[in-house]
Image (spheres, rainbow, N blue to C red):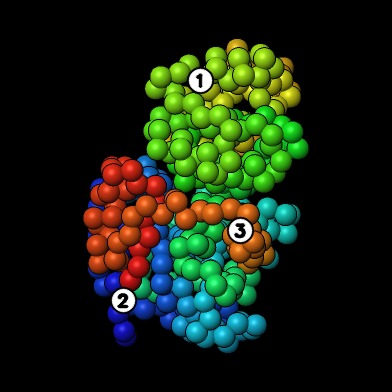
Amino acid sequence: MAGMQAAVFQGPGKIVLQEKPIPAVGPTDALIRITTTTICGTDIHILKGEYPVERGLTIGHEPVGIIEKLGSGVTGYHEGQRVIAGAICPSFYSYACQDGCASQDGQGHSHGYKPMGGWRFGNTIDGTQAEYVLVPDAQANLAPIPDGLTDEQVLMCPDIMSTGFSGAEHANIKIGDIVAVFAQGPIGLCATAGARLRGASLIIAVDGIDDRLNISRQMGADVTLNFRNTDVVQEILRITGGRGVDASIEALGTQATFESALRVLKPGGTLSSLGVYSSDLKIPLDAFAAGLGDHRIITSLCPGGKERMRRLMNVIETQRIDLGPLVTHRFKLADIEAAYDLFGHQRDGVLKVAITP
């Protein structure tokens, strides 16, 4: 059987490039030749052993590529077509999907249920940091890339853009709202852009790195606050005249950012949590108004499926948003271990890396 190169999890602290067989294609699958992929913060949680996956699994969940082979039951696509697939690749026949929550399509599969819902690539099946990836339920998940868009232009769609936008969507943002976005990494930057598209009139971006705050202005932030030299909770309350923000979006996954997002929230406001947490959260009694504040706390897992991907690519194609500044570094797949070292240690101003076989 022909082989391919893939980034494989071998245990905490060790993701290495090794040869694996090219996957066989079943009737409902599609084999995609990867042309560009990337590393996500969740992959770093895997690398550190903070999120458990099986040893020997190919990591990665953000595919851009070309259809190499289609299963016999997949129609409406052709080999050689440029496509993406969402990081969450739902079946659309599970109970969760039919109940309107496709991202939680985690039950009814042979690999069993895991807390991260329908996230399969690089979690329960081999992922995208490889020369090829097998896309399950391809009919529901392959999204053709519009002519004229480059790989890097659509690279954020499978996960980062979809997740960040879902944070804004679930935050119940209305036209004229004031929104605070805590953390301006790639997902937070997309949440900032999503808040602008949803109609927020004042967006306050919080981070500890000035370069990221500068990019957040390109994404739609009106006010930027560096938590290293400002008491951001007091400043946000000052900006809002003590009322608090209509919605806050937490995009890092730490106790400090979650608590700050709650403390600046108005009574009846929504805290939209996007962070992947690696330890228990504690909700402070005063900030939570002892449970009497009519607050809404909602979490999101990256929405997937071909319709979601089509809509995101529409936003890019019509130039409503430019996510090009998020790709700061480029590596060949052969250098994936160096890419992990850079991204995992957040050196050299890295936001996202483009990985090309």
Residue 147 appears at what percent x and percent y?
57, 75
Q: Which mark is residue 4?
A: 2
**Left or right, 102 with reference to 61:** right
Would you say residue 260 is visible in this rendering? yes
Query: How far apart are labels 1 and 3 at the CA level?
Result: 32 Å
Residue at x 28%, y 43% (from the top left corner): 347
Q: Secondary structure at mark 3?
A: loop
Q: Which residue is under mark 3? A: 319
Q: Quadrant of residue 168?
A: top right
Tell us which disc is closer to us: 1 or 3. Answer: 3
| Mark 3 and mark 2 residues within 8 Å of each other at the beta carbon | no
Of residues 125 and 245, the one nearer the viewer is 245
Query: How far apart are labels 3 and 2 at the CA level?
Result: 36 Å
Residue at x 30%, y 79% (from the top left corner): 3
Tell us which disc is closer to us: 2 or 1. Answer: 1
Would you say residue 8 is visible in this rendering? no
The kind of residue on which mark 1 rests is Val
Residue at x 59%, y 45% (from the top left corner): 193
Q: Residues within 10 Å of mark 2 (few under 14, many from 20)?
A: some
Residue 343 appears at what percent x and percent y?
32, 48
Residue at x 28%, y 44% (from the top left corner): 348
**Left or right, 327 with reference to 177:** left
The kind of residue on which mark 3 rests is Gln
Please tell me whether residue 56 is drawn above or below residue 176 in the rendered image. Answer: below
The kind of residue on which mark 2 rests is Met
Residue 175 appears at what percent x and percent y?
76, 37
Residue 68 appears at what percent x and percent y?
46, 83
Q: Which residue is under mark 1? A: 232
Q: Secondary structure at mark 2?
A: strand
Tell us which disc is closer to us: 3 or 2. Answer: 3
**In which quadrant will I find the C terminus?**
bottom left
Query: How far apart are labels 2 and 1 at the CA level?
Result: 48 Å
